[in-house]
Image: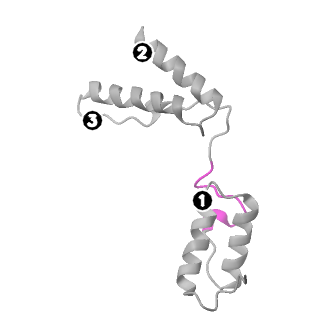
Amino acid sequence: MSSSTTDKKPENVARGLKAAIHNDRNSDEAKQNAAQRLEEMGEEVPADFSNGQDKEYSSKSGSEEYDAGDHAEDDGGDDGKLEGNRRRGYKVTLKNPRVSEQAKEHARKVLDEADE
């Protein structure tokens, strides 16, 4: 099968390539290929990828801990609902096969501390 874009709408192809660049599940090689194809098509490569690094969507390294408090918003005093949502999130973390063992340990620790 050819990778030619002759029978496809160029704007849709470009949109898909830009999405590939921003998808953190894609390899660096796939992102580089998408950027190269965009250049060949005469399309603008996203500025945050100009040096081959997807800065906007870079993930934290596995050694850094995630703190849900960093992203919690003050919702006008509904702390019970916020805490319930937080606990449910940690419980889901324990069952998610894509979550690292380190993250699961952290979730267990948070849930254990909340039960005390």
Judging by the rendered image, the residue that carries numbered circle 2 is 114
The amino acid marked with disc number 1 is: Asn
Q: Residue at x 73, y 59 (%)?
A: 28
Instruction: Confirm or deny contact between disc 2 and disc 3 (CB under 8 A).
Output: no
Quick check: is 56 in the magenta stretch? yes
- Residue 80 picture quarter: top left
Compared to residue 113, the image places residue 24 above or below, namely below
Tell me which numbered mark, 2 or 3, is placed earlier along the sequence.
Answer: 3
Between marks 1 and 3 in the image, the one whose residue lies nearer the viewer: 1
Compared to residue 96, the image places residue 83 above or below, namely above
Element at label 3:
loop
In three-dimensional space, the C-alpha distance between marks 1 and 2, rounded to whole angstroms, equals: 35 Å
Tell me which numbered mark, 1 or 2, is placed earlier along the sequence.
Answer: 1
Furthest toward the bottom, the residue is 6
Furthest toward the top, the residue is 116
x then y, percent, for residue 110: 49, 19
Which dot marks residue 33?
none
Which dot marks residue 75?
3
Q: Which residues are magenta?
A: 47-58
Quick check: is 90 in the magenta stretch? no
Judging by the rendered image, the residue that carries numbered circle 1 is 23
User: Which class describes the residues within 10 Å of circle 2: few (<14), some (14-19), or many (20+)?
Assistant: few
- Residue 31 picture quarter: bottom right
Tell me which numbered mark, 1 or 3, is placed earlier along the sequence.
Answer: 1
Element at label 1:
loop
Element at label 2:
helix
Q: Nearer the viewer, residue 79 or 85?
A: 85
- Residue 36 picture quarter: bottom right
